[in-house]
Amino acid sequence: MSTLKLTLIQAHLHWEDKGANLAFLEQKIVNLEAPTEIVILPEMFNTGFSMQPELHAETMEGPSVQWMRRIAMAEKIILTGSLMIQEGDHYYNRLIWMLPNGEYGHYDKRHLFAFAGEDQHYTAGNKRLIASVKGWKINLQICYDLRFPVWARQASNNEYDVLIYVANWPEKRSHAWKTLLIARAIENQAFVVGVNRVGLDGNNIAHSGNSMVIGPIGEVLFHSADQESVFQITLNREELETIRTQFPFWKDADFFTIQSS
């Protein structure tokens, strides 16, 4: 229970080509050099950040979720990343938290990126997902959510231990991405993990990756830019508890509640 093994996959996604994306991501997962407990994929890992859910969205019984279930069960890992999901007349940018027994949880992106028209194609979620693994509590969020600190704020003492963002964050705003990941770690006294993509997408938008793991006092434990990478890291619970005990800043925090709309 004292450690948590994570694998970050920073990938150059094939634009709106599910078959190609699932095939090469599977190869990266099955060829991991060391055992892992959680594998983290980027936002919309099977298509890239597409505004065409009418063409590419699947149901929760569709092939991409079934692929996640098959990989998680075969490799005995938790597999997470987001993809476009259809429910009735609504489309969601949905993060799936697939367990090795085939069961799953999900989180629908709360903050839709209106600058790219995401709010015109997708429905926003209104509930956070905090998963539990070996006593670790993990808050799961998506890309643009990073700009909204209240949505990630610890609402009580040690509400979560790890904050994960999966993303398709453009290179032009990479400074904001790196800065805000560090800020979320410092203000919440938690490990923060950001997994982004690299390469040009179908709209000719460049992505530089800059996937990162940040420690609970804001120290950068891992950073990779401008290339595909697979990185494995072990988080230490003792380190987290020591920081929280030595610097119990949560006692002075403002109390608040988040109202869903």
Image (spheres, rainbow, N blue to C red):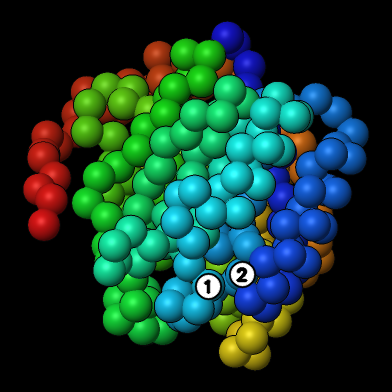
Q: Amino acid at mark 1?
A: His
Q: Is residue 77 left or right of residue 153?
A: right
State the SS at label 1: helix
Q: Is residue 36 left or right of residue 242?
A: right
Q: Quadrant of the C terminus?
A: bottom left
Please provide percent x and percent y for residue 169.
54, 69
Which residue occupies 37% across, 32% down? 130
Q: How many marks?
A: 2
Please provide percent x and percent y for residue 245.
40, 14
Which residue occupies 75% across, 29% down? 75
Q: Earlier in the sequence, mark 2 or mark 1?
A: 2
Q: Height in image: 183 above or below 139? A: below
State the SS at label 2: loop
Distance CA(mark 2)–CA(mark 1)? 8 Å
Label ID, residue 23: none
Please identify the quarter of the rendering in which residue 235 is found.
top right
Q: Amino acid at mark 2?
A: Thr
Q: Height in image: 216 above or below 165? A: above
Label 2, residues with CA under 10 Å away: few <14, some 14-19, many ≥20: many
Which residue occupies 61% across, 38% down? 69
Query: In this rendering, which labeled residue sits more in front, label 2 or label 1?
Result: 1
Q: Nearer the viewer, residue 90 or 5?
A: 90
Please give the residue where the numbered disc 1 appears in the rendered image. 56
Q: Quadrant of the N terminus?
A: top right
Please give the residue where the numbered disc 2 appears in the rendered image. 47
Residues at circles 2 and 1 in contact by the CB criterion of under 8 Å: yes
Label 1, residues with CA under 10 Å away: few <14, some 14-19, many ≥20: some
Please identify the quarter of the rendering in which residue 170 is found.
bottom right
Please provide percent x and percent y for residue 89.
27, 68
Please provide percent x and percent y for residue 43.
55, 60
Q: Nearer the viewer, residue 58 or 257?
A: 58
Q: For residue 5, say whether it is visible.
A: no
